[in-house]
Image: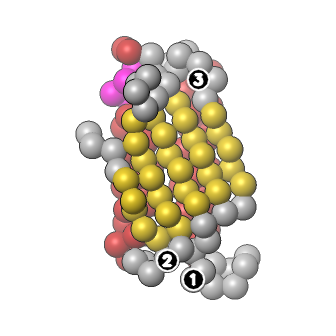
Amino acid sequence: MIQAKFFRGGDGSLHMRLEGHAGAGPKGQDLVCAAASGLACTLGSTVERLYEQGMLRRVPKVELYEGNAEIIAVPKERFQKEVILVFWTVQTGIAELAASFPGNVRMEEALRV
């Protein structure tokens, strides 16, 4: 089961953590896992681009490993809404996966917008 968490840190940081495997099919053929991985990779690439465009206070943490993903971004004050929207969009995709495949994905914590 994939466990998903989206939350804010005390320093204004935005976090996404995915842990585990969906178990919806054989390795390399698990479409639920592929969907979650695609969303995680999209968020990782997007926060790296946001940093390049000067919208983040520091280099984002983007760690994507088999069965685990952790992404942390700290938006500059004036870009907070835009960065939150990016995280919220990916969170919505993960929430849809959890609703469609409750035996494979669980949303443990979600950002409030």
Q: Residue furthest left?
A: 113
Instruction: Name the secondary structure under disc 2.
Output: loop
Specify the amino acid type for callout 1.
Ala
**Which mark is first along the chain, 3 or 1?**
1
Query: Looking at the rendered structure, which numbered label has been put on residue 38?
Result: none
Task: Name which quarter of the figure residue 45 lies in.
Answer: top right
Query: Looking at the rendered structure, which numbered label has been put on residue 24?
Result: 1
What is the spatial separation of the Cα atoms under label 1 and label 2, in whole angstroms?
Answer: 7 Å
Label 3 crowd bin: few (<14), some (14–19), many (20+), radius 10 Å: some
Residue at the image point whose x is 50% and y is 63% from the top: 3
Residue topped by disc 2: 104
Q: Is residue 9 left or right of residue 17?
A: left
**Which mark is first along the chain, 2 or 1?**
1
Expressed as whole percent of the image width and height from the top left, the position of residue 2 reads 53, 67
What is the spatial separation of the Cα atoms under label 3 and label 2, in whole angstroms?
Answer: 32 Å
Expressed as whole percent of the image width and height from the top left, the position of residue 17 reads 53, 50
Q: Which segment is the magenta one?
A: 79-83
Expressed as whole percent of the image width and height from the top left, the position of residue 67 reads 66, 63
Label 2 crowd bin: few (<14), some (14–19), many (20+), radius 10 Å: some
Residue at the image point whose x is 60% and y is 46% from the top: 70
Residue at the image point whose x is 72% and y is 79% from the top: 27
Quadrant of the drawing holding the C terminus: top left
Q: Is residue 91 magenta?
A: no
Residue topped by disc 3: 51
Q: Is residue 78 above or below residue 86?
A: above
What is the spatial separation of the Cα atoms under label 1 and label 3, in whole angstroms?
Answer: 35 Å
**Which mark is first along the chain, 2 or 3?**
3
Disc 1 to disc 2: CB gap under 8 Å: yes
Q: Is residue 10 above or below residue 70?
A: above
